[in-house]
């Protein structure tokens, strides 16, 4: 059995003992997007790694959160679970992701929009498969493709990368992305991928949640342009910013904390945990050993 699934340390402490020194991680992913653990395994893994509060923030889907709702009730006495999502927003450069916390997973408008996003992602994956065939004459077994496209999850490039590893075209997911998929993705990328950030914010707030800008460094903007964008986003309802993340240096975290203070934004943070083969060296709760979060203002807001 893999170490990350090992449950031998479960239930050794009392709830109060566990929570006293436990960590916070509000950015994690499961098998329902591009993570490696099922929601229940993620919950168990959080406990085993001294994480007392987690948010499951799968990309463009809440299917994992719905499954997590019925997960191990005993572990939930130790680990507080925040229902979340990470929405992909349209941008001209870099990547913009909007985290939503405390959302109503039964909100009809959110569920309807996510269903459309999932269908679009299926079409995008099919386009990628055609591009890979044209560029490299690489084909996968029909059985594997049917299983992928019909899966009850939000499929993405990571799923295709795993097929490259399975068929021995590459040794790792990262190699598959770099050697084949990133280039193919650029060729088939359309303006239709992603949602306008204004709609992302509206969807999250409409579902009773708190919209937060994830890892601002992925926008690839200089400080002046980033400040201008965040000012605009605040006017459109942004309520928080991720100030702690596995990819941040101490200087970056301090800069984002200053931004939070300047615009009166709630502070969030998390590891962006996916699993070792997808994001190497990123551990739940501690990230790349640069995170040991014990307090976040967004939690104060969520608990009110």
Image: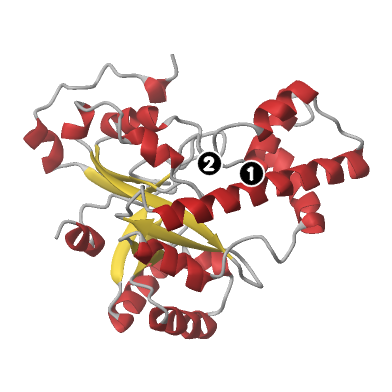
Q: Quarter of the image for the N terminus: give it.
A: top left
Q: Are marks 1 and 2 in contact (CB under 8 Å)?
A: yes
Residue 44, numbered circle:
none
User: Residue 70 at what x, y percent from top left?
Assistant: 30, 30
Whether residue 190 sits left or right of residue 241 in the image: it is right
Q: Identify the element where label 2 is drawn.
A: loop
**What residue is rendered at 60% in x and 67% in y?**
90
On the image, which quarter does residue 231 sit in?
bottom left
Residue 246 appears in the figure: no
Which residue is at the front of the view, 141 or 178? 141
Q: Please name the residue that numbered disc 2 is placed on.
A: 33
Compared to residue 15, the image places residue 65 above or below, namely below
Compared to residue 245, the image places residue 257 above or below, namely below
The residue most toward the top is: 1
Residue 40 appears in the figure: yes
Whether residue 299 sits left or right of residue 95 in the image: it is left
Compared to residue 222, the image places residue 112 above or below, namely above
**What residue is rendered at 27% in x and 16% in y?**
8
Q: Answer few, some or many: residues within 10 Å of disc 1's Cα (few below 14, many 20 plus, some between 14 and 19).
A: some
On the image, which quarter does residue 180 sit in?
top right
**What residue is rendered at 38% in x and 58% in y?**
100
User: Residue 277 at what x, y percent from top left?
Assistant: 56, 33
Q: Quarter of the image for the C terminus: give it.
A: bottom left
**Which numbered disc, 1 or 2, marks the residue that appears first in the sequence?**
2
Which residue is at the front of the view, 183 or 211? 211
User: Residue 72 at what x, y percent from top left?
Assistant: 27, 26
Q: Please name the residue that numbered disc 1 is placed on.
A: 156
On the image, which quarter does residue 156 sit in?
top right
Whether residue 78 sits left or right of residue 158 in the image: it is left
Q: Identify the element where label 1 is drawn.
A: loop
Q: Find the distance from the CA under tag 1 to the CA under tag 2.
A: 7 Å
Which residue is at the front of the view, 64 or 22? 64
């Amino acid at each position: 059995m893999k170490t990350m699934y090992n449950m031998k340390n479960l239930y050794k402490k009392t709830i109060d003992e566990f929570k006293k020194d436990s960590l916070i991680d509000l950015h994690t992913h499961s098998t329902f997007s591009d993570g490696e653990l099922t929601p229940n395994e993620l919950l168990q893994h959080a406990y085993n790694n001294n994480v007392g509060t987690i948010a499951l923030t799968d990309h463009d889907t809440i299917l994992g959160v719905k499954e997590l709702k019925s997960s191990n009730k005993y572990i939930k006495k130790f680990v507080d679970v925040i229902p979340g999502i990470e929405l992909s927003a349209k941008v001209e450069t870099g990547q913009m992701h909007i985290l939503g916390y405390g959302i109503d997973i039964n909100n009809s408008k959110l569920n309807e929009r996510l269903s459309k996003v999932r269908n679009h992602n299926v079409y995008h994956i099919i386009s990628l498969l055609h591009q890979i065939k044209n560029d490299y004459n690489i084909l996968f077994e029909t059985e594997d493709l049917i299983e992928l496209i019909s899966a009850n999850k939000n499929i993405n490039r990571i799923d295709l990368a795993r097929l490259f590893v399975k068929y021995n075209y590459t040794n790792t997911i990262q190699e598959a992305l770099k050697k084949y998929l990133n280039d193919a993705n650029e060729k088939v990328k359309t303006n239709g991928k992603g949602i306008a950030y204004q709609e992302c914010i509206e969807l999250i707030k409409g579902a009773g949640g708190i919209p937060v800008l994830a890892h601002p460094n992925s926008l690839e903007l200089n400080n002046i342009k980033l400040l201008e964008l965040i000012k605009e986003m605040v006017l459109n309802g942004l309520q928080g910013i991720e100030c702690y993340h596995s990819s941040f240096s101490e200087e970056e975290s301090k800069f984002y904390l200053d931004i939070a203070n300047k615009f009166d934004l709630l502070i969030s943070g998390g590891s962006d945990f996916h699993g070792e083969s997808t994001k190497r060296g990123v551990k739940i709760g501690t990230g790349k050993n640069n995170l040991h979060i014990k307090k976040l203002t967004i939690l104060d807001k969520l608990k009110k």
